[in-house]
Amino acid sequence: MLALADVTFGYDARAVVRGVSLTVARGELVALVGPNGAGKTTVARLAAGLVPPRTGTARIDGRDPATTARREVAQRLAYLPQRYELAFPFTALEVVMMGRYARQRGPGLDSAADEAAARAALARCDVAALAERRFDALSGGERRRVVLAQALCQGAEAIILDEPTAALDPAHAIAVAQALADERARGAAVLIVTHDLDLAARYADRIVAMADGAVVADAAPATVLADARVQAAFGVTLHVGALPGGERFVVAR
């Protein structure tokens, strides 16, 4: 569903992404991890078609996003950036309704089904009670959950999220991870950029680890987190354990 093939990208003479290949299939949740400055956010933007690669190819459901109408891309892909800013005082419900735009027949034609989908997404992200509150009056964690609801409301076949659990307390971080697992279960291709290695170890089918703009490992979570190259990139030793129920956890030392 999402595919990057040997892509490179940079700013002026500085290379940010170097020969990255990455795929995410339908019904798969892939976590993209690595230290700060590894190029993860740029790879997410390349996969979403927001920036064109210098070399290599990016495809969404086999289509080149650079030559595909943005509305058509939006029907297939939901993208959640690290930072989400709005210039006008929309309510939380109105922000989530923006996720329905690509599926509407024209501007300003919100239907009862659109509102029902938006309210259901707000409930899934535990922000239904904030529906009529101004987005700019919410806390950082509340805003994050509202924007995640917008992405879920879109009903896309592929979802790319950059730090979806940033600023969230542990309970809401787990709830968000479970919501993404539910999206995978319905057949969506899910790619998350995250520094939460516990979340990646517990929920991801695969972990793709980056360092210095390149992929250094791409395999099952336990395999990647035990890889000496990955631990060297993070500058710590990672210990992967298991809880009584079999769920994994990660301790850095």
Image (cartoon, grey):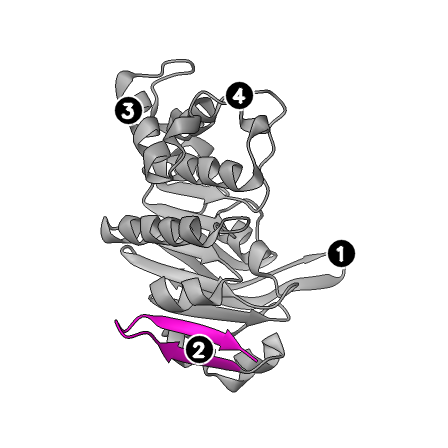
Please state which of residues 13 and 137 is positioned toward the viewer in this rendering.
Answer: 137
Which one is closest to the eye, mark 2 or mark 3?
Answer: 3
Which residue is painted at 53% across and 23% down in the image? 134
Q: Earlier in the sequence, mark 3 or mark 1?
A: 1
Pointer 3 residue: 116
Residue 12 — which label?
1
In contact (CB < 8 Å): disc 1 and disc 2: no
Residue 11: % across, % down: 72, 55
Q: Earlier in the sequence, mark 4 or mark 3?
A: 4
Q: With respect to residue 98, does 55 lie above or below? A: below
Q: Secondary structure at mark 2?
A: helix
Q: With respect to residue 156, does 195 lie above or below? A: below
Which residue is painted at 50% across and 43% down in the image? 66
Residue 90 — which label?
4
In contact (CB < 8 Å): disc 3 and disc 1: no
Q: CA distance from mark 4 to mark 1?
A: 37 Å
Q: CA distance from mark 3 to mark 1?
A: 46 Å
Q: CA distance from mark 1 to mark 2?
A: 32 Å
